Image (cartoon, rainbow, N blue to C red):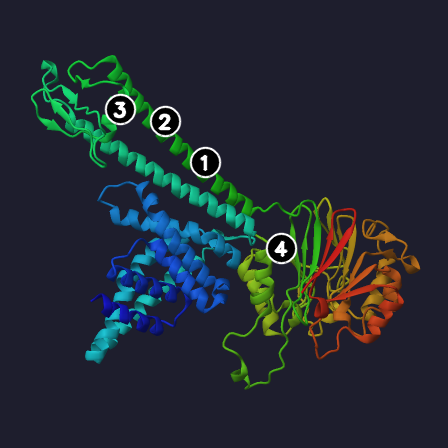
């Protein structure tokens, strides 16, 4: 029978696709059956270690596979941790199945948690409840029905079809439950990817917790056995003195594994526990008179109880300390220390688009645009679309924000409604809570733009139309000023949102002051809007930009630290007038590699070179990060 199952396992692995987790289970099953056949079966840890060695010998790159990591870690954790954890739960038979499932679920969550947040950066607080509901549902309903459909279908196709339909409905119920639970967004938490040091500390603490739980359970079992032994060796009639317990001490030690023997006064042979016998020998007593116990016997008995109580307190204190350490690690991971007084502006590498992430010294988060992929597919060419196409928001922007531990966006700025600036924002709104949105105050006849604004309204996110002159103080070290667009000329009382299909000229232009450093972020405006903007600044109150940059730019302008090139560095933007007014020290261009527009344009790059401005480009250098601590400005690129 064992060999029949042994031969069926490879077929099962093939039928289920041969993923790393299935291979691990199959190898452990085959190795366990083989070891049992040879009477060499030891424990699960030997099997899982052997399976890991075999899989890595076959394909060393499995070590980088998340399913391989989770499968082996969780299985090893269940082997080591379920028994001690279960021993800490109530031992009654009434709810035994529930407590068994609870122990397995909690241990699996504790072991998988670091890897899950490292790769996926989120953890749902309902996941424990979901496992308690879905694991038995899938194990005892869905899988048996599916297996029955497979077997029955070979002999009776109609019956197999009926069972298969039931299996489909059961799966639909599973997906419905998962969707309902995951839709509870307030219970979904976002975690920054932890360091390897944090992950190692977590597993050390959890391993110590398992060891302490096992030691406490072992101590309780030993104490219960000791109490049971004492009860069995207690005299039948203490009041008469009959039944006194004698220790039969020979000059030689008893044989290995044999306890010391005792005789009652009536000559009956009794075998007390080894622990009792050793206590008696250490006290130098040959007789324990249970009717009138000596002071020495009483003291030793009390000492043993005190030692056991002390040990229990020690284990309980250790368990509480390990649990507190785990809680401290959770807080450390969820609040990883903020920005340590540093502000940072990241020009994200989103291809031919714009997305800028700002983190303030106090931990506020601002996102300016979300990138997007422009397609030129004609009507009727939908068949060319991939089933799971690359989407910059879902695949780049949202995961990156989560990896950096962004729990919410304090401000989302939509400079304008072109696809290369808003295409990734749907995924951002689906993933990360947003407190407020600042946009250019217009509508574009484009389904993507309309959907995005409706999505924001549906999530009850306040929308503010940007107008030159607006300011927002994010914290004591961070302020934003809107330089463009100018307030629209409209009739008094009109609340109509204008429709603008050519959006570049109406981009929101932001002047950002961060830790004493200035950043000018002009969206996609062209040289004409640059000229009009500079003219409008002459009519602004003298204190409007008093905190932005330094005086000393050309033509009465201001000196800025970093200029983001408008419209990806196109030919018709970043004019010499613009450069002379702002006199930037650094410039950054966001463009796609080998893009068909030729961005950034050579003429624009020549103007920057003539002005003595160093330019960094996302198409060549990847993400551009500017970090400031209030004194210096540090730049690095991440490819």
Q: Residue at x 31, y 34 (%)?
A: 219
Q: Are marks 2 and 1 in contact (CB under 8 Å)?
A: no
The residue under label 1 is: 321
Q: Is residue 550 left or right of residue 474?
A: right
| Quarter where residue 431 is shown | bottom right
The residues tagged by marks 1 and 3 sit, at their Cα atoms, a distance apart of 33 Å
Residue 310 badge:
2
Frontmost residue, 146 versus 476:
146
Q: Is residue 359 left or right of residue 4?
A: right
Residue 571, above or below 211: below
Say which label, 1 or 3, has the lower sequence index: 3
Task: Give the label, 2 or 3, closer to the camera.
Answer: 3
Q: Are marks 3 and 4 in contact (CB under 8 Å)?
A: no
Q: Position of residue 184 (x, y in %)?
A: 45, 55
How would you rate the neighbour count of disc 3 (Cα within 10 Å): few for under 14, some for 14-19, many for 20 or more?
Answer: some
Secondary structure of the residue carrying tag 1 is helix
Residue 279 badge:
3
| Quarter where residue 178 is shown | bottom left
Residue 52, above or below 4: above
Q: Position of residue 160 (x, y in %)?
A: 23, 76
Secondary structure of the residue carrying tag 2 is helix
Say which label, 4 or 2, has the lower sequence index: 2
Task: Give the label, 4 or 2, closer to the camera.
Answer: 2
Q: Position of residue 274 (x, y in %)?
A: 23, 30
The residue under label 4 is: 436
Say which label, 2 or 3, has the lower sequence index: 3
Say which label, 3 or 4, has the lower sequence index: 3
């Amino acid at each position: 029978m064992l060999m029949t199952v042994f031969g069926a396992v490879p077929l099962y692995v093939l039928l289920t696709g041969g993923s790393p987790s299935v291979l691990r289970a199959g190898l452990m099953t085959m190795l366990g059956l083989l070891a049992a056949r040879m009477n060499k079966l030891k424990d699960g840890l030997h099997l899982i270690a052997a399976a890991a060695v075999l899989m890595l010998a076959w394909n060393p790159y499995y070590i980088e596979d998340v399913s391989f990591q989770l499968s082996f870690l969780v299985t090893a954790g269940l082997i080591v941790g379920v028994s001690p954890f279960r021993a800490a739960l109530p031992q009654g038979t009434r709810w035994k199945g529930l407590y068994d499932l609870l122990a397995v679920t909690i241990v699996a969550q504790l072991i998988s948690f670091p890897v899950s947040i490292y790769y996926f950066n989120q953890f749902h607080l309902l996941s424990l409840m979901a496992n308690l509901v879905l694991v038995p549902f899938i194990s005892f309903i869905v899988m048996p029905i599916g297996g029955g459909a497979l077997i029955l279908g070979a002999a009776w196709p109609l019956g197999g079809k009926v069972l298969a339909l039931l299996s489909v409905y059961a799966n639909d119920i599973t997906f419905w439950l998962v969707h309902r639970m995951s839709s509870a967004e307030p219970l979904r938490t976002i975690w920054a990817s932890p360091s390897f040091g944090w992950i190692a500390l977590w597993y050390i603490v959890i391993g110590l917790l398992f060891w302490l739980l096992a030691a406490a359970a072992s101590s309780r079992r030993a104490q219960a056995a000791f109490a049971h032994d004492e009860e069995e060796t207690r005299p039948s009639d203490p009041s008469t003195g009959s039944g006194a317990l004698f220790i039969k001490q020979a000059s030689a030690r008893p044989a290995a594994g044999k306890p010391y023997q005792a005789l009652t006064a009536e000559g009956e042979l009794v075998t007390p526990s080894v622990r009792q016998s050793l206590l008696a020998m250490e006290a130098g007593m040959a007789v324990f008179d249970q009717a009138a116990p000596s002071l020495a016997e009483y003291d030793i008995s009390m000492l043993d109880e005190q030692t056991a109580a002390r040990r229990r307190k020690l284990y309980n204190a250790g368990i509480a300390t390990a649990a507190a350490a785990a809680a401290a690690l959770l807080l450390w991971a969820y609040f990883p220390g903020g920005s340590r007084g540093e502000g940072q502006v990241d020009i994200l590498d989103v291809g031919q688009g714009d997305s800028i992430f700002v983190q303030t010294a106090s931990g506020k988060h601002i996102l300016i645009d979300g990138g997007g992929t422009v397609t030129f597919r004609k009507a009727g060419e939908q068949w060319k679309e991939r089933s799971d196409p690359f989407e910059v928001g879902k695949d780049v922007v949202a995961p990156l924000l989560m990896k950096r531990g962004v729990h919410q966006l304090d401000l989302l700025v939509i400079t304008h409604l072109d696809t290369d600036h808003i295409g990734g924002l749907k995924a951002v709104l689906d993933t990360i809570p947003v407190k407020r949105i600042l946009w250019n105050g217009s509508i574009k006849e484009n389904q993507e733009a309309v959907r995005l604004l409706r999505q924001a309204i549906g999530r009850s996110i306040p929308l503010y139309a940007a107008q030159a002159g607006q300011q927002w103080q994010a914290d004591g070290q961070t302020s934003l000023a809107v330089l463009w667009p100018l307030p629209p000329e409209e009739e008094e009382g009109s609340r109509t949102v204008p429709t603008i299909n050519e959006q570049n000229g109406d981009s929101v232009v932001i002047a950002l002051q961060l830790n004493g450093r200035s950043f000018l972020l002009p969206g996609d405006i062209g040289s004409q809007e640059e000229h009009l903007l500079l003219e409008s600044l002459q009519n602004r109150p003298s204190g409007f930009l008093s905190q932005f940059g330094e005086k000393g730019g050309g033509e009465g302008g201001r000196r800025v630290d970093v200029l983001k090139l408008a419209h990806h560095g196109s030919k018709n933007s970043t004019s010499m007038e613009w450069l002379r007014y702002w006199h930037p020290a650094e410039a950054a261009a966001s463009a796609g590699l080998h893009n068909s527009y030729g961005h950034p344009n050579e003429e624009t790059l020549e103007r920057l070179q003539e002005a003595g401005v160093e330019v960094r480009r996302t198409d060549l250098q990847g993400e551009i990060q500017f970090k400031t601590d209030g004194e210096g400005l540090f730049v690095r690129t991440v490819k």
